[in-house]
Amino acid sequence: MSAVSPSFPPHEAVHVLSDPESGLRGFIAIHSTALGPAAGGCRIWRYRSDREMLDDALRLSAGMSFKNALAGLPFGGGKAVLALPEGEDWDRERLFKAFGRAVERLDGAYVTAEDVGSSIADMKVVSGKTQYVAGLPSKGGATGGDPSPWTAAGVFMAMQAAWSHATGKSLAGVVVGVQGLGHVGADLAERLHLAGARLVVSDVDPDRLSDAVDRFGAKVVEPDHLLGEPMDIFAPCALGGVLTTLSVARLSARLVCGAANNQLADPEVGALLAERGVLYCPDYVVNAGGIINVVAEYLGEGEEAVLRRVGQIPQRLLQLVAMAKQSGMEMNEAAHDAAMEAVAAANPKICVA
Ligand code: NAI
């Protein structure tokens, strides 16, 4: 692991996955098991290099530790990141079976589920090889199934609370820029439309855009132009790293609240947002609804546990707003400190950063 930049957070373990027969290539990063088994989804994506793939695994698994800790879940943080094979000539089922075997070999230290690029169907294949998987189809009213609606619900409630805190107003008539109309973004857009918000949207998929125009009367903007568009709230729901020094300089929104993981390109952007009077809702605080549902399924808990924990997201966010104000910290720093405290309280011997 000597090639990894020293700026990366320390991890308990990083497992290299390589199975030439199925084409499986990737990493399972286990950031921390201080609070319990490392839980986090399996991303399958086309990366420019193995180094970029490893970087993503390390950042995402650390984020899962913080997300799970702040959501009060008895789980640590981990993430699987796989390389999407080139071309059409590969067998998806074979690849996910090999992935399932790799998860099983870790003997419960890591629990997987779907993430960007993987699906419930993929996790069903994985479940043929390991019990350490969730995000499976729900059966007979039990928890399970697609976690995205729960993620969207948590983001929406957090946005309502933060906007009301900042302005004393509801979301009616407020202009919200939604970047990415996938599983979470489309659901969030629907909730916002029902709440009377006006939508400005971008996506790289034209079908998703025309759907948003038809259903919500959304205004469509080219992906590169969304951040410069006049808006009150920005909801990043595509990929990470969207808030940079340059992009924040173009942002007119007063609030940033969305589902995408790792929205800040680097932690310093948190200070820049605050300087510009933008309230940043830390991603891993507001997007915890999905993992809350996944964990309830894994533990055999009912929907009331999911509702209770997702319902706590706005209150947790407002506590962080108060903590940041009192301490002079930025929102991202306050969330990081609170998460570290939660992990350290569970097991002070484990070092997380
Ligand atoms: P998804 O893959 O269903 O949707 C992503 C959408 O973004 C797609 O419609 C895609 O076309 C669009 N997109 C890609 N590049 C874009 C660009 N440059 N500009 C605008 N749109 C672009 O993914 P999903 O599940 O909706 O997740 C969205 C984000 O939320 C991801 O960052 C994911 O890690 C995060 N997240 C998702 C959770 C879930 O429950 N699905 C839970 C927590 C976080």
Image (cartoon, rainbow, N blue to C red):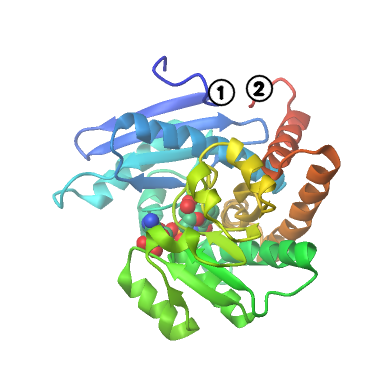
Q: Position of residue 191 (x, y in %)?
A: 59, 75
In this view of the protein, can residue 125 be seen by the observer?
yes
Q: Amino acid at mark 2?
A: Cys
Towards the viewer: 126 or 195: 195
For the residues labelled 2 and 1, the Cα–Cα distance comes to 8 Å
Ligand 1 neighbours mark 1 (CB distance < 8 Å) = no
Q: Which residue sits at x=49%, y=59%?
A: 227
Residue found farthest to the right: 326
In the drawing, what numbered circle is on residue 351?
2
Helix, strand or loop at label 1? It is loop
Residue found farthest to the left: 89
Q: Residues within 10 Å of mark 2 (few under 14, many from 20)?
A: some
Locate residue 126 relative to residue 134 in the image: left or right: left
Which residue is labeled 1 in the image? 10
Residue 144, quarter of the rendered image: bottom right
Q: Is residue 89 above or below residue 137?
A: above
Locate residue 89 relative to residue 227 in the image: left or right: left
